[in-house]
Amino acid sequence: MTEKNEYNQEIVELNDANYIFLLYMIYILKKIEKNKEFLSFAQLKSKIKEYAKKDLSLEKIVKLSINDVAFEKLYNDVYSYINALPLSSISEIIIKNCENYFLQNKYLDEDLENINMHILERKDKNYGNVFIASMFVKKFIFEKDNVDSVVYDFYDDRLNAIVDILFEIKSIKHKFLKSASQEINPGSIFDTVIYMPPYRYPSLISFAYKNDRINLQNQSYEFKMMIKLFLHLAKDGKIVSVVSTGILNKNSDIVFKKRLIEKKAVSLVVEMPRLKSLSYPVSMVELSHDNELVKFIDASKFAQNIRRGINLDSLKIINAIDGKIEDSIGEVNQEYILQNDYDLTPHRFFENVKAEFVNPTPLKNIVSMIYRGFQIPSSMLDECLSDTPTKIKLLTLSDIEDSMVNKSSLQSLKYLDKKMEHYVIQDNDLVISCKGKTFKTAVVNVPYSETYVSTGSIIVIRCDQNVIDPTFLKIFLDSQIGVDALKRIQTGASILSLNPTKLNNLIVPLPSLAKQLMISSSYKYKLKDLLDIKETEEEMKQSMIKRFDDGFMKLIN
């Protein structure tokens, strides 16, 4: 008995796919024929070919492995030992070998699966009918019996053959869909649905999509799959889908997102960190029925640096999902998403910062005007620019330096065109860049005798100064909380872009005007110090240049 146990341990450590096939063949022979005799390899081939006509998984095995010399040697070496074991023991060995095999052939980050399962977790542990739109979700396949599942098939025949073997042993009902265009049985209703594409391997995704003639860059595929699955979801069911983060932004697949929002299907969106182990940045989306609110988790910073790259800090992400990390979670209603172009990117809807604000107020309620500057055609600009100084100045994005307007760099205009009159900046207007890699802000002090006109790279905010001080608003927008709020309403990834409509809905704190002015006064004092330092620095620079110029002239003369 001890000898057999030792040999079983040795078997468990063998992870070659051929070995799994061999175990399954022996299992089938014993199960069907109650065979007790040792068969030669030639006899085995004959038997397998006979059964293969009725069993597709065996047919795959025959094609892939039956003529392999190493496989024949393996068969001859171990058959007599394995054949002596009962069916239940062979089943355990097969399952263990399958688990080891798939651990060695990971197609998705394991931490993602753990987070996925945490979102799905049901209090009564009853997952009901399960649809798995992925090759492997180990928690279900290895830990739960009699799962009524559908596995989405986009891998090679060898892997599929192993899946067939495993599902046969585990008594899991399943079928394979060869493409997203293949329909699920119209009457099928699932309580639990998991959709986890193999983002670690772009070539496998391409292979999956090719049957549907979908280009890898056409991300509609993911939404199409989610909508298809949602149509088969039980009333109290739940879907957890791992998706590429890119499909969540406002510029992607509005038609499909609109359908999900109108059905009140989206309940949770979790943005994951960018992992080196995956081909794309990914997020998790939870779908269920009748959701009035959508919960957003910005987990994009919850990662750990490890020796071989970056890994998810899954504990932090799970804690955030459970509401234990409050500054990482927020909720918005479906109407809010509709008004924001169906953008589902968590960091852009991170509204929980309101809780930190005194009297949180939409910007549109406390300003008299928000507009974008005049987009001057180059031909018109050449005509308007003056070579000599005038009282009409053109304010461009490059004129904003260190939170101030550099008046010495302002270009002069010959005249104020009638079209430009609508874009004249008033004293104490707040200006903010609407394009660039970072947000620039400044409160503009316009000299009494001069006129400033803003260009299209700038948004002008005219505050109701009876309610909010422009400098206080600038301080907020420059703060980390303000920058995060701006990022949530921006468009673009590397090049930031703002528009007045989005700014109107920006939530800002609104303490008493007296408190605002006190904060602004302290800020202006520090800003004056910065200006003095810059002027002193410029004077020192010019002094050095003059000294070395004089010395150089003396030297050469």
Image: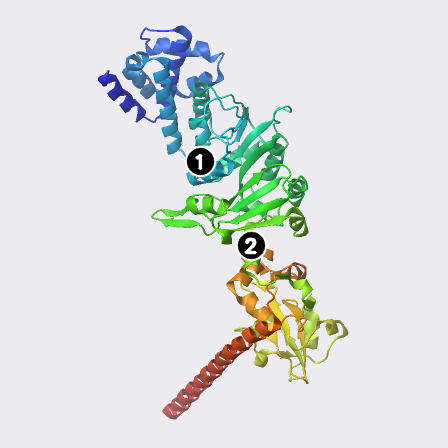
At numbered mark 1, what does the secondary structure look like: helix, strand or loop? loop
Which residue is pictured at 28% across the width and 14% down the height?
Answer: 81
Residue 352: which numbered mark, if any? 2
- The picture places residue 351, in percent across and down from the top left corner, at 58, 54
Which residue is pictured at 41% across the width and 86% down the height?
Answer: 544
Residue 85 appears left or right of 178: left
Asked if residue 323 is positioned above or below residue 56 in the image, the reply reads below
- State the CA–CA distance, disc 1 to disc 2: 35 Å
Pointers 1 and 2 in contact (C-beta within 8 Å) = no
Task: Identify which amino acid the numbered label 1 is placed on.
Answer: Tyr
Looking at this view, is 322 or 71 the one in front? 322
Looking at this view, is 515 or 285 the one in front? 515
Q: Which residue corresponds to mark 1?
A: 107
- The picture places residue 487, in percent across and down from the top left corner, at 56, 58
Asked if residue 223 is positioned above or below residue 473 in the image, the reply reads above
Q: Is residue 161 visible?
A: yes
Task: Identify which amino acid the numbered label 2 is placed on.
Answer: Asn
* Res 543 quadrant in image: bottom left
Dot 2, crowdedness within 10 Å: few (<14), some or many (≥20)? some
Which residue is pictured at 56% across the width and 57% down the height?
Answer: 355
Number of numbered discs: 2
* Res 165 quadrant in image: top left
Asked if residue 240 is positioned above or below residue 130 in the image, the reply reads below
Dot 1, crowdedness within 10 Å: few (<14), some or many (≥20)? many
Looking at this view, is 263 or 220 the one in front? 263
Asked if residue 130 is positioned above or below residue 328 in the image, the reply reads above
Q: Is residue 219 visible?
A: no
